[in-house]
Image: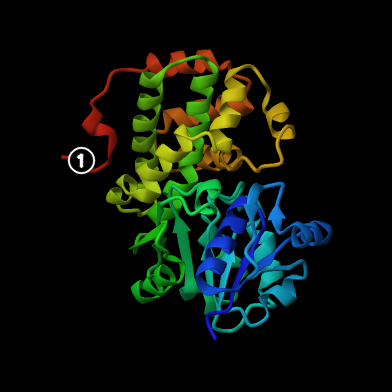
Amino acid sequence: MGTAICVVGAGGWGTALAILLAQKHGQVRLWVRNPEYAKEMAARRENSLYLPGVQLPPGVQLFSDLGQALTGAEVVVSAVPAQATRELARRMRDFLAPEAVVVSVSKGLEKGTHQRMTEVLKEELPSRFHSRLVVLSGPNHAEEVARNIPSATVVASHDRALARKIQELFMTPSFRIYTNADVVGVETGGALKNIIALASGISDGLGFGDNTKAALMTRGLAEITRLGMSMGAHPLTFVGLSGMGDLIATCTSKHSRNARAGKEIGQGKKLEEVLAGTRMVVEGVWTTVAAYELARQRGVEMPITEKVYQVLFAGQNPREAVSHLMERDPTFEEASYPGYT
């Protein structure tokens, strides 16, 4: 018998990981929140809403009862949107097997608390699970991973042996995995890159070019690193897959829901209009609120995040926001990071 694995959350990413794990291990459980949609997925063997055109392998078992899905699962993959993670953890805690490992693959900061997903899970799950929380994050569009297009990602845990165990569990010939002990940095990079992707999309919507996007991505990485370091992350994590790698993919890809939402805002749509027009969760929107507030609390300069916040929530004109960024006081690039000498 192999490892019993349950993926909780049947969005595009959860479904893609269930497909990958079923291909490798033969069988995996996938929890679908809506019972009627679970039946439809079972009949069609496809997630037509979030991952159309990709067939579910026979080994993907669909559940709408969370307790049944989790019973006896040795590895549980938490794949719901960031803002739903707390509610999910509260529902899961009574069903988790005593020795279960929980792998968080959600990217975001919780609105209100400003917490990373492992911090949310630690608050809601019994203490025996705290040392068995793992993060998986990187430049991984579900549309590509599900089709076995070569991809790479990072597994982060304070327990290196546990990280290696999850690395082996997920790694396939088309899905290469690296381990990292910097949980804070890996989670922070995965969350904050969505804000910069919104900014890049706004730039596209305004008709700006590659120079503008390159500047936003590079300076965006600088402010992600500043905030991450203030939280205890290692700066080199942000030039790896879960930082720069994820930033590149999310800012430039046709699959990026955050960049797509930003583009519509740059073209003149209001945030409410954009969100109403998609079934997908645009994680960067609420992470922008959390990061903006957190940066102010910590005294960290994040000008791009600040402008995205003002465009989304304070009615600032996107073109005016770009002008303000360009007209800021001159500074030295190497002064971007605290402690630089």
Residue located beneath label 1 in the image? 340
Would residue 259 appear left or right of 329 to someone viewing this image? Answer: right
The tally of labels here is 1
The answer to whether residue 119 of the structure is visible from this angle is no
Instruction: Tell me the quadrant of the picture where the N terminus can be found.
Output: bottom right
Q: In the image, is residue 251 above or below residue 180? A: above
Would residue 65 appear left or right of 237 to someone viewing this image? Answer: right
Residue drawn at (54%, 37%) of the image: 256
Residue drawn at (63%, 70%) of the image: 59
> Residue lying furthest right in this view?
36
Name the one closer to the observer, 324 or 170.
170
Q: What is the x, y in percent for residue 10? A: 67, 57
Would residue 111 appear left or right of 211 to someone viewing this image? Answer: right
Element on which disc 1 rests: loop
Q: How is the image coloured?
A: rainbow
- Judge the density around disc 1: few (<14), some (14-19), many (≥20) Cα neighbours within 10 Å: few
Instruction: Tell me the quadrant of the picture where the C terminus can be found.
Output: top left
Residue drawn at (53%, 76%) of the image: 129
The amino acid marked with disc number 1 is Tyr
Q: What is the x, y in percent for residue 305? A: 48, 32
**Quadrant of res 216:** top left
Q: In the image, is residue 21 above or below residue 276? A: below
Would residue 114 appear left or right of 60 to someone viewing this image? Answer: left
> Residue lying furthest left in this view?
341
Residue drawn at (61%, 23%) of the image: 265
Name the one closer to the observer, 24 or 284.
24
Q: What is the x, y in percent for residue 7? A: 61, 66
The answer to whether residue 8 of the structure is visible from this angle is yes
Name the one closer to the observer, 46 or 67.
46
